[in-house]
Image: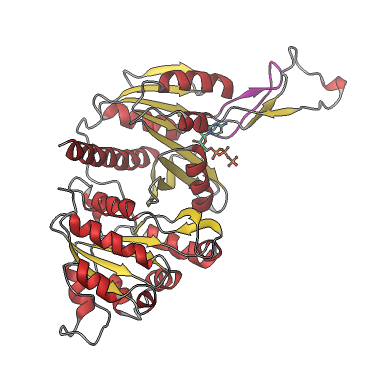
Amino acid sequence: MTAVAGKRIVLGVSGGIAAYKAVEVCRLLVDDGAHVIPVLTKGATRFVGRTTFDALASEPVRMSLFDDDDPIPHTTLGQTADCIVVAPATARVIGAYAAGISSDLLTATLIATRAPVVVCPAMHTEMWEHPAVAHNIATLAARGVHVVGPESGRLAGGDEGAGRLSPPAEIVAAVARVLAPDRSAQDMAGPDRSAGDMAGPDRSAQDMAGLSVVVTAGGTREPIDPVRYIGNRSSGKQGYAFAEEAAGRGADVTVVTTVDRPAPPGATVVRVDTAEEMAAATTRAAAAADLVVMAAAVADFRPVEAADAKLKKRDGVPEIRLEPTPDILATLGAAKPEGQILVGFAAETCDVAANAATKLRGKGADYIVANDVTADNAGFVHDTNEVLVLACDGRIHPIGLRSKRQVAHAVLNLVVADRNADDRVDSQEKQ
Ligand code: CTP
């Protein structure tokens, strides 16, 4: 039995070519024991017939705010739903929902609910990347709406790009995760109630006992000569916050760090300086790790040669040739042992969600914790942070401004909850 069994799920279907895949979402949810009520927009019926949903769902299709026995169908649907999933969600529905405009039964139901909402966008790449759509998605994510996908791949018309609806099985798995009983209360809260706060209850329980965790922290230093180096502004505070949080929850922690700072009691500390040293130490430690958190700010370039002696002013301005460093996260992502969870970071100065999504895919991470390092009180040096967590199944979780320890707490809540949910699915499949 999965977490959707026995739940009332409103399946919103809007008008895009991917509407035909919503039929499969409906069937999978019903197969898993959910009570599915399809709500179609007028546009959806241009792509898929309502008879198909009538035959597969638990209740007949609803479409109208007015031609229903129930005089207020949107309130009834919104109030009684355990979850609303919109698949596919078009740019129009996303825009209306973000703006609070209720022009049809689906958008009215979305606004009338306090249940968790899962939105699965599907549209052409140009539309998905339009700043208005990106802004609306960020608005919804910041309100606690779970955004799943889209994926990149072949689109209607034959072109390739981002905008494809996530596979139905992934959508259903995301709904199950949202409904899983051990989700923290705040994470489960419906849209717009908690601004996506995932801090949740105090998990002082040793819920990471037995897990081996590797955390990298600080900025690497790439030597130019014995006294100078190329570095960055990273303080290592966020990495140490992860190490402290994981150790506090019972994990066996190794910190690979460039920073001289006391590590949590019991943690193993590996002190490094350069990207090369960090790559070697992290790869070694990660071989047997359950979770790797790449919080370090690794230099992307290093001098091809470091001078043996201090470069003297009298010899003129040196020309320093640079070469790329190894990408540690990408290397780990490419050779990830089964079951290992890889958390990367993305330090951005613009287009945070889009750049982070590219890193998530490109580096083979399971999660990317992304932040705008130019934002007030967030990023390098500060004691506080404000991040978006992108999961590899397309979910985006915003974590509002709070201490770096609380950010680590919220991210680890998510990772541990997902891991437990996956373990449950594995053991059900084996039975
Ligand atoms: N990272 C890494 N090895 C590198 C560079 C980065 O392992 N040589 C990791 C970081 O620890 C972080 C993630 O990759 O978890 C993203 O780092 P970031 O600096 O945001 O991105 P870059 O890959 O450097 O890309 P860009 O400079 O284009 O933003």
Instruction: Note whether 26 is above or below 256 in the view shown.
Output: below
Q: Position of residue 291 (x, y in %)?
A: 36, 30
Frontmost residue, 166 versus 260: 166
26 or 334, nearer to the observer: 26
Task: Give the magenta range.
Answer: 220-234
Taking depth in this image into account, of 219 and 172 the one nearest to the observer is 172
The quadrant of the rendered image in which ligand 1 is seen is top right
Residue 295: horizontal and vertical position, in percent? 46, 33
Q: Is residue 339 visible?
A: yes
Residue 226 lies in magenta, yes or no? yes
Residue 331: percent from left, percent from top: 51, 29
Q: Looking at the image, which residue is at 35% across and 41% down? A: 411
> Is 8 left, or right, of 368 in this rendering?
left
Q: Is residue 313 above or below residue 355?
A: above
Residue 379 visible to the viewer: no
Residue ID at (37%, 42%): 407
Write the residue at 18% across / 54% down. Answer: 32
Q: Relative to 205, is 305 above or below?
A: above
Residue 99 falls left or right of residue 259: left
Q: Quadrant of the C terminus?
A: top left
